[in-house]
Amino acid sequence: MPVRRRIPADGGGSPPLADIRRLRGGIDLGGTKIEALVLDDAHAVVGRARAETPREGGPQAVAEVLATTMHEALGIAGVAAEHLAGVGVGSPGVVDDAAGTVADAGNLPDWIAPYPLAAELSQRLGGVRVRLGNDVSVAVDAERLLGAASDRRNVLGVWWGTGVGGGLVINGELFHGRGFAGEFGHTVVRRGGALCGCGNRGCVEAYAGRKFMEAWVHARVAEGHETSLLKLMRKQGKDRLTSGIWERGVASYDPLALHAMERALRAIGAGIASAVNLLDLEAVVLGGGMGERFFATHGPRIEQYMHMNLFRPADPPLVLPTKLGDDGGAIGASLLVAAA
Amino acid sequence: MPVRRRIPADGGGSPPLADIRRLRGGIDLGGTKIEALVLDDAHAVVGRARAETPREGGPQAVAEVLATTMHEALGIAGVAAEHLAGVGVGSPGVVDDAAGTVADAGNLPDWIAPYPLAAELSQRLGGVRVRLGNDVSVAVDAERLLGAASDRRNVLGVWWGTGVGGGLVINGELFHGRGFAGEFGHTVVRRGGALCGCGNRGCVEAYAGRKFMEAWVHARVAEGHETSLLKLMRKQGKDRLTSGIWERGVASYDPLALHAMERALRAIGAGIASAVNLLDLEAVVLGGGMGERFFATHGPRIEQYMHMNLFRPADPPLVLPTKLGDDGGAIGASLLVAAA
């Protein structure tokens, strides 16, 4: 595998001069953290840095932290921004790469109107070319080119985290449809069912998105049910049920945690089955914060629930973990500037 | 449009001799009827014939009627079987074109084991080349090449009939996955819901397949509900609720007919929405016996139910009727031998 997952604290030394112009930057912009990587043309990580995503200050504050985090990764790699072939950013919200803007990024501070992220970031990085992509799409593309989906033609990426994102590899290429394909989280698994953030009912995300699992727990607690989840949250000084808290709740057999998890697994399994019945996919890759954390323990359960709704159960797709893990988003973002 | 939908009773005269070797045959093998067409290289129908599908006698009886029906169409076209570039057959069941067999065709008489349909039919048609395809796939392919989907890149065909079939056009080509893509009817719209013929629960087909709508009506009647549907059926001397009977029941506001139709429309609409959310399709083509009959009156209702579950309701796909109608299956089957 050409991707080096861990680099020494000193960054592994500077690359030879001849390779510098082939370096590229990739940034994964998440609701919680920002990860910046510098990669060489063999897709090896030669610099990395992380920062918390600002919770206030609007898009400008975020652009500022994106730039400083990338500068930090460049420092570790021992190169300057102007040596990069470009920087790709994987972002939530409505991403318009042609216009260089991101809008409606609900998990980022005050980020509603289209913000010219490409130009603003480029200006802070010595004028380097900046390309934008959807955060889940770029992560799935990284798995397609370098990871779990690299030798497969038709693959669904299910990114289970705060929400449930998706990405499709069709005939070996990332599939875009009219530009917005991959909304696996809005597969209807229960017509008229639970209310989703998209305003519709019965979507996979309405059962499985971490945010919706949390809302469901709060609603049950309001009805008088008890759970250790909220106690764990307060004890850890958090203001939301992180995937780590879910893991502890499930491991301690907290009834509400188990019930919420069951609803999530069933919804994801049924949604995957629908996609497989329609597309006869070879494989499904499970990523995202919740997916990474629960694949080993709960991946087989998702497979079982998928099986219950497969039209051809004798020939199920593989259900695989990501290969690139947490780095996938930033690696995929860097691929946006790889074909220079 | 290059396809002539109606030909005069005399068959429109024989084609010029030079064109004869470019003629091809297409047969749509349905549970109720068999349609055979002879087409020229401009896809114009130059001969046609129909017959009822045998209800007994097994695959041999069916192969015999396929051959006589094709001979009849050839007679109208004024050519012999050996002048055809080949004959394509669109068949239900498990079709293995490479092996030349069809198995598990539940709506055909005693047709479980793989039957060498290609060889048996070829032998009855002067040794002409016979190719086999899935009945719905070939009909969707005909719409892709010559019909409603001809200028579109990403299209879902929903074939609403006895069951609910499907076919996908992706990047302008019929999409097969590992060979079995397109099972739209087994999209899960209600996890744990109504039992489907596939053994799973909550599939679109379990609500919308004509056979399942009928079973639902029988179950309600057994509970004491009243309906004009079964009276209409007996009056017409039928043993099942044909699409024509459903049309009369709905038109006369029979409560059970309206309720069954509503369940079907909701399931189809939700299923389409899931496919569109995942694939960002440009268009959906509604075909099949029920689809053809109800598109004008109930297509807008399907669109409404689709809208209720679209992630991007501002940019819905077109929902279109077929262009080739009932001929689509046989035309599509003939395309199996067009690239000779």
Image (cartoon, coloured by chain):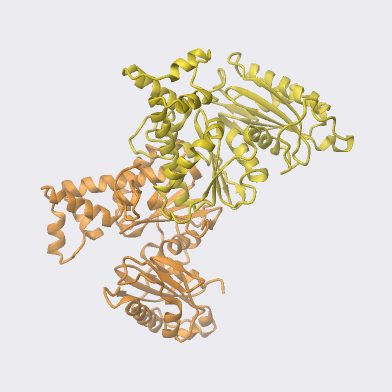
Chain colours: A yellow, B orange
Position in image of residue B192 (x %, y %):
33, 42
Q: Is residue A46 visible?
A: yes
- Seen in the picture, residue A153 relative to B86 is either above or below; the reply is above
Front-lying residue, A309 or A172:
A309
Relative to residue A325, is residue B49 drawn left or right?
A: left
Q: Residue furthest front?
A: A252
Position in image of residue B20 (x %, y %):
51, 82
Q: Residue furthest right?
A: A17
Front-lying residue, A141 or A132:
A141
- Seen in the picture, residue B317 relative to B292 is either above or below; the reply is above
Q: Quadrant of the C terminus of chain B?
A: bottom right
The quadrant in which residue A1 appears is: top right
In this figure, what is the number of numbered marks? 0
Q: Residue at x 65, y 38 (%)?
A: A324
Q: Is residue B275 visible?
A: no
- Seen in the picture, residue A120 relative to B54 is either above or below; the reply is above
Relative to residue A170, is residue A224 drawn left or right?
A: left
Position in image of residue A44 (x %, y %):
76, 37
Position in image of residue B133 (x %, y %):
46, 67
Front-lying residue, A262 or B25:
A262
